[in-house]
Image (spheres, rainbow, N blue to C red):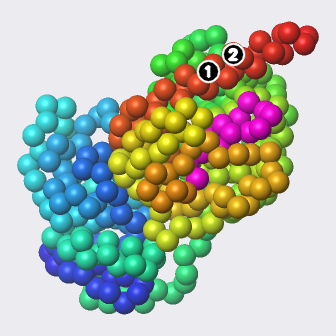
Amino acid sequence: MKNYLCLENGSVFEGELLTKPNKKAITGEIVFFTGMTGYQEVLTDPSYKDQIVIFTYPLVGNYGINKVDFESKKPHVAGVVVYEGNMHHSHFQAEYSLNEYLDKWDIPLLSHVDTRAVVKNIRQEGSMQAAITAEGQHTFESKLDGLAAHVAVVSTKQLESYGEGDKHIILMDFGYKKSILTSLIEQGCRVTVVPFDTKFEQITKLKPDGILLSNGPGDPKQLEYLLDNIKKIISHFPTMGICLGHQLTALAFGGNTKKMLFGHRGANQPVVDLKTKRVYMSSQNHSYEVDEPSLEGTSLQVRFRNVNDHTVEGLMHKDLPIFTTQYHPEANPGPVESSLLFNDFLQMINDYSGREKAYA
């Protein structure tokens, strides 16, 4: 069935709808993902909440959808745009085809779109609103907001406990990926997942050894009302921040964040660790970045930097046991080489615990 992708700048692209017809236009911020694989993880990553995702690789869906690579219990994207997506899957773990899976969740899959031309639009003019519709035009009634409500939607509503181990980690859930939790459990941690707005006093009662601030959707500044609480928490416990958690750490200590033209989304972003001089190939998904000049005069310094555009990819505190990454060290999808940073997190916790005992 013929459908259209309409962009806020007036561009219109024709395609074929592979899922059932929509009763109304599906709208969202349009973004692109450059990885050759990993579409299942992208679809179920809460950071993509209500976004329309374009996959730049021309063949999407050839290994189907399995039951093990989900990052959450359901897909969060508003729509999917591909060049070719109606393929017979050929993987022994596959349970569904891509279009069967999206059809189940009433998410449109638009195929045979000139994805190169769409991505050129985004790279030139930046992220914008888009619509998948049966009509050849669409009127956008409002500008993109900061997606403030999306964190509240994707975050857990109650405490959840996982794993067993000597180290107790609090995972503050702004929209965490399952692979972050898995990485902590594989490190021998006991993990308690808590709602994104859990108070310092409640955190303290749980007696954590460390804190992990998770990824999540939207503009970090929409959560400014939480910054005092976040700063208090991470100033008292060893902390690792990932993606949105990285941005919130910067804001909590007086830094600033800003929206990028089209962000980083893919499994092929080179990042250098300024501490070790080691370069990682990383998985990324973000629209916002920490504004490096704003860090001057704060207690934070840059630890990781993007090799391509030199943007800030991670921070470390000058005095406290805190470090952050803008990218995803748990990968999924993507290269796993930076997963060693979870070892660093546990070592930081052990070192902090040793210092505390020495001064007790």
Q: Residue at x 32, y 75 (%)?
A: 120
Task: Give the main secondary structure, helix, strand or loop, of the magenta stretch.
Answer: strand
Name the image quarter holding residue 159.
top right
Does residue 227 appear in the picture of this structure?
A: no
Q: Are marks 2 and 1 in contact (CB under 8 Å)?
A: yes
Disc 2 crowd, CA 10 A, few/some/many (<14, 14-19, 20+): some
Q: On the image, numbered disc 2 is attached to which residue?
A: 350
State the residue at coordinates (55%, 32%): 276
Q: Residue at x 91, y 11 (%)?
A: 360
Q: Amino acid at mark 1?
A: Leu
Q: Report the front residue among 140 and 305.
A: 305
Which residue range is magenta in the image?
312-325
Q: Is residue 58 magenta?
A: no
Image location of residue 156, percent across then percent down: 60, 41
Can you give x and y, in whole percent of width and height, for residue 237 in the image? Answer: 77, 29
Pick whichever, 282 or 37, lies toward us. 282
Q: Is residue 299 visible?
A: yes
Residue type at the position of mark 2? Asn
Compared to 139, does 80 lie above or below?
A: above
